[in-house]
Image (tube, rainbow, N blue to C red):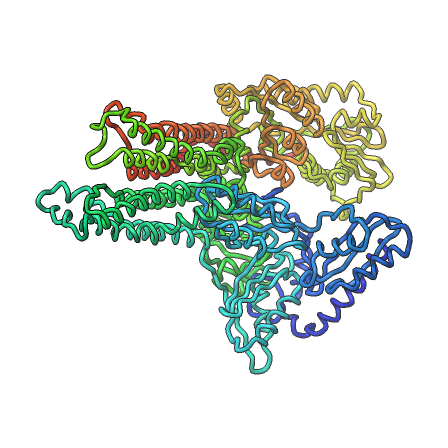
Amino acid sequence: MVGHEGQWREDQSLSKGLHLTMWGDDVDFRNSSHWNYGLRSREPWNKEMEINGKDELKLPLLQPLNGVVVTASQPSTIIDKKIKTVMFKIGNIACASCATSIESVLLELNGVESVMVSVLQGQAAVKYIPELITAKAIKEAIEDAGFPVDELPEQEIAVCRLRIKGMACTSCSESVEHALSLVDGVKKAVVGLALEEAKVHFDPSITDFNHIVEAVEDAGFGADVINSGNDVNKVHLKLEGISSEEDINIIQSYLESVEGVNDVEMDLAENKVTVSYDPDLTGPRSLICCIEKAGQGSNFYHATLYCPPRQRETERQQEIWMYRNQFIWSCLFSIPVFIFAMVLPMLHPYGNWLDFKVQNMLTVGMLLRWIFCTPVQFIIGRRFYVGSYHALRRRSANMDVLVALGTNAAYFYSVYIVIKALTTDMFEGNDFFETSAMLISFILLGKYLEVVAKGKTSDALAKLTDLAPDTAHLIALDDEDNVISDMEISTQLIQRNDILKIVPGEKVPVDGIVVNGQSHVNESMITGEARPIAKKPGDKVIGGTVNENGCILVKATHVGSETALSQIVQLVEAAQLARAPVQKLADQISRFFVPTVVVVAFITWVAWFTLGELSIYPKHWLPKGMDGFELALQFAISVLVVACPCALGLATPTAVMVATGKGASLGVLIKGGNALEKAHKVKTIVFDKTGTLTVGKPVVVSAVLFSSFSMEEFCDMTTAAEANSEHPIAKAVVEYAKRLRQKFGPQTEQMTDIKEFEVHPGAGVSGKVGEKLVLVGNKRLMQDSNVPVGPEVENHISETENLARTCVLVAIDGKVAGAFAVTDPVKPEAGRVISFLHSMDISTIMMTGDNWATATAIAKEVGIKEVYAEKDPLGKAEKIKNLQMKGMTVAMVGDGINDSPALVAADVGMAIGAGTDVAIEAADIVLIKSNLEDVITALDLSRKTMSRIRLNYVWALGYNVLAMPVAAGILFPLDRIRIPPWLAGACMAASSVSVVCSSLLLQSYKKPLHVEDARDVSHNSNPK
């Protein structure tokens, strides 16, 4: 099978070469365009890109998280995009003839390109064109041939985000989720009620966007594709010079042939193109050059950047305007109905004309109320009929069903009264047209206020999105770093490795590193750090931050969706989609809420009608002009419309939306409601030492020799052994050893390479430098490697550790040659934060891979009493599990790769200081700053949010529990207290608005602890 796979790849490469040869001379546009600013020269362009691909700066500051973005491998050419390979495990393959039978059956299918069946492995590899046939059809063909397909392995999983329209309550979101889960090929679907979005993971070989959208629409809701998670880097271009379909095809072919282009979407009607690309290989300016180069002879093509309107804000605004307009139109008809029914009849003689009889007992007032109420019921209130139809069709019920039942009962009973009055000269009765009209008006007012309030729940996220500037200054430098050109371009046209000039007062457009100049940058909008941060060449800057007082040149390292700002927005959006466990209460109630309300309303009507017919209550209880049937009907309608499932559904997601957005603005990224709910239960916090409680930038303060080795050889061996290590202590040792080496003579021009390099987690490193075995690490590494540690070394270790310093031993050929004393200053706020946590009844533990003496000294300095030292990564995770077995809810705060197992094992993992990419992926909460006060902020915000969610539930449930009995008339016998249907509708609308407004109060959240930032601790130390 492996050999065959190789043959397939070879054939495919040949096809790819033939295709590219057609355009080979025309596509080489990179070196000829006026867009290539920001590069030092034209020739090294590709080399620079290659070098950058290996550079650490290529890695995003915040990596996409599991469940946030699912990246499928993207083919590099047009041929790859049209042909896919699927693997099947097939049973009952006994011999070569079976394999031949399967191959012959499949090759007859239209769209199957090649088939390879392995008899020994019982597998089949099928190459097919997805536009012509699906993987499911291929599987069915094999089964029809008499061979069972034991499993259809997971193919590449794509992800897309949908905007869902028309959801009103939890029942709606559950219906959408259910509809999506029934689509063949959909692996997972998550729907956010407050965010009004859905994230769908699906197999693109089985289904596509169109089928997914159709499933949502069939369920009765609107759906628009926002984007695909695989196409995170996109550019929208407006084309000029297009005169025919042939021009479109030429441009599309040129773009698809560019290396790094993943997808090209052409809009023929608008002459627009959307290109998804890999920023490592190409960029928007290169794509514009490609389009311009596609023009031949008299054909001249030109492309300009096109910024599509923000869909979310646009649709939100349209929804607000829709409800506002519907409410205004409803009032234009409902107010006259109210005046004719309630006001004028009380103003004699001004309302006497309403009693004028048109035919038999039909009066002018009755006729006018019917005329004005009908448009409200059937035109303005049409949305309730449509919503009810779709809800009942999917065998569920929502608020629309209750409103439709209540208003229809009032309207059609009133129509019955009109018909009876028209046909009978002795009939007397009252219509309820004002009940129907005013009920719809109040509900529309409530929906309008609810939409406005819900829009404000995402204000924090919108502010983050708006941080990036619209334009940037792109410059080009010569070999001597002199500026040779300077031009202003759109931020969307920035490519990796561009050199950008940021003058005082301007925003940094993308993430990058300073290559020239010094300044202070205000990062408060991203990290919450109030004090401007000094920046010098080599320092990283974050897109969206503000340059304060100096002109700096920045080399772009992260563009598009890879910037820290984009990653934060993506993380927060994913968090807002995640459903908190406490939401299950509302989900369970929503399943039987509406049917229960309908049953209660019917029982209410039967009870009051029976009591009236049996004359159990006195006749003077009846309101003027109303009989027993009408009173019972009013009570039933009030029960129907006063119940509010919407308030229950909005209680949790709106609070989570506000909290996650507010947290992001404070530099605390919470990954959804689950993390929020767990964090508020935390009673024990485990802190890592290095980089968490300490500054994380170790400094070597001394070095000592224990053997006959010279200081020169000692430094050279140490530098060679530690050069490949990424540990902060290793970097400090290398820096110190290099500076110390310079004091004892000229350093060798070329560093000696290390062989057999090995990292010992929690202990150190080892390897062979030349012919000598070198060990650099702690005492445990020496013991594990059978290196004797003499009394002199033991005494030095004890003295060093008693000073809260780490002793790094260096052994050469089985003998301790010397040692470095390393110190890592404690963060200035650590002591106050630990004290504050104790005041919150949260116990603290320190767990580190460092030695016991250093760990104990640091713990004593910050106020932690429980310490676990000399723990490797798995040991940390095991210790956390032991704490959990004692019934503790444990949070782990760490920053490194070695903390990842513990972060995953903990109930709540917190990655501090944006840590490493692995730590961020493992954590439930990401603290952008390295300030420990954000640990308190995260826990306190989670407690405040859960309290707010409980308050929302108390209000939503309490409202329904109290309002329904009052609406049913339980207080009517006491003092004739009842809730008319129109007032019940107003109460129902007010309950939803009140829950959203309650959640909005979280926007006023303030940090519980503000630690004064100490001055930067100097990490430069002169060798002794």
Q: Quadrant of the C terminus?
A: top right
Residue found farthest to the bottom: 298
Q: Nearer the viewer, residue 838 or 461?
A: 461
On the question of residue 748 being in view, the answer is yes
Q: Is residue 838 placed above or below 105 in the rendered structure?
A: above
Question: Where is residue 350 drawn, in percent x and y?
Answer: 10, 46
User: In this image, 673 relative to 646: left or right?
Assistant: right
Would you say residue 529 is visible in this rendering? Answer: no
Which residue shows up at 43% across the image and 48% down it? 387
Quarter where residue 105 is shown? bottom right
What residue is shown at x 28% (from left), y 51% (from top)? Answer: 328
Instruction: Give the answer, above or below, for where 287 lies relative to 497.
Output: below
Residue 107 located left or right of residue 510 = right
- Look at the picture and state if 516 lies above or below 479: above
Q: Is 1022 or 260 nearer to us in this picture? A: 260
Q: Position of residue 856 (x, y in %)?
A: 63, 19
- Residue 809 % position (x, y): 75, 28
Q: Position of residue 375 (x, y in %)?
A: 30, 53
The structure residue drawn at horizontal position 78% and vertical position 18%, both measured from the top left corner, is 791
Q: Which residue is nearer to you in this view: 893 or 991?
A: 991
User: How many marks overall?
Assistant: 0
Left or right of 25 in this view: 379: left
